[in-house]
Image (cartoon, grey):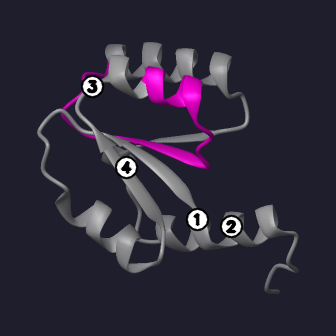
C-alpha cells in the first residue's frame, strides 16, 4: 500500500519502520500543508497522522483530505493498534481484487 505519514518531528518512528518491513511504501512529510499538496497530486491508500499534531488541527486536516480523496483511510497514530498493519494487508488484498482470508 502507498501510505503518507504526516510527522512534524521528522523521525520515522517504529510505526513507519514496521510498515516498511511489511512491504508498504511510506512517504513522510513534516506538515499538513505539504501533505495536502501531495494528496492533490498523488493517490494514497492511507494517511497516518503523528501524535505531535493537535486534535483540532488533525480533524481539520482529515476533513480536507476527504474533500480531495474521499476514499482514502486516515488514522491518527494515537489510536495505533497492533492489528493496524494486518488491516492494511487486508485492504491491499481488496484493492487487488484478491479473496480475503476467512
Mark 1 closeness class: few <14, some 14–19, many ≥20 residues within 10 Å:
some
Give the mark nearest the N terminus, 1 or 3. Answer: 3
Marks 4 and 1 sit apart, C-alpha to C-alpha, by: 15 Å
Residue 101 vertical placement versus 56 (above, below): below
| Mark 3 or mark 4, whichever is nearer to me | 4
Mark 3 closeness class: few <14, some 14–19, many ≥20 residues within 10 Å:
some
Q: Which residue is mark 4?
A: 27
| Mark 4 or mark 2, whichever is nearer to me | 4
Q: Could you tell me which residue is drawn at 78 percent across and 62 percent down?
A: 95
Which one is nearer the viewer's eye here, 75 or 27?
Answer: 27
User: CB under 8 Å between callouts 1 and 2?
Assistant: yes
The image shows residue 49 at horizontal and vertical percentages of 36, 38
Q: Is residue 53 magenta?
A: yes
Q: Could you tell me which residue is drawn at 34 percent across and 14 percent down?
A: 56
**Quadrant of the image containing the N terminus:** bottom right
Marks 3 and 4 sit apart, C-alpha to C-alpha, by: 12 Å
Q: Which residue is mark 1?
A: 88
Q: Which residue is mark 3?
A: 31
Q: Is residue 44 left or right of residue 97?
A: left
Marks 1 and 2 sit apart, C-alpha to C-alpha, by: 6 Å
Which one is nearer the viewer's eye here, 49 or 68?
Answer: 68
Q: Which region of the structure is painted magenta?
A: 36-55
Give the mark nearest the N terminus, 4 or 2. Answer: 4
Q: Which mark is residue 73?
A: none
Residue 62 vertical placement versus 16 (above, below): above
The image shows residue 11 at horizontal and vertical percentages of 12, 50
User: CB under 8 Å between callouts 1 and 3?
Assistant: no
Q: Which residue is mark 2?
A: 92
**Quadrant of the image containing the C terminus:** bottom right
Marks 3 and 2 sit apart, C-alpha to C-alpha, by: 26 Å
Q: Could you tell me which residue is drawn at 45 percent across and 13 percent down?
A: 60
Task: State the image quarter where residue 28 is shown.
Answer: top left
Amino acid at each position: 500500500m502507498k501510505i503518507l505519514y504526516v510527522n512534524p518531528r521528522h523521525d520515522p518512528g517504529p510505526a513507519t519502520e514496521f510498515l516498511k518491513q511489511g512491504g508498504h511504501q511510506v512517504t513522510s512529510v513534516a506538515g499538513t500543508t505539504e501533505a495536502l499538496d501531495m494528496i492533490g497530486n498523488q493517490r494514497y491508500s492511507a494517511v497516518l497522522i503523528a501524535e505531535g499534531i493537535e486534535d483540532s488541527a488533525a480533524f481539520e486536516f482529515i476533513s480536507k483530505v476527504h474533500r480531495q480523496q474521499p476514499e482514502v483511510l486516515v488514522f491518527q497514530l494515537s489510536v495505533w493498534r497492533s492489528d493496524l498493519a494486518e488491516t492494511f494487508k487486508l485492504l491491499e488484498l481488496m484493492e487487488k481484487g484478491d479473496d480475503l482470508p476467512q
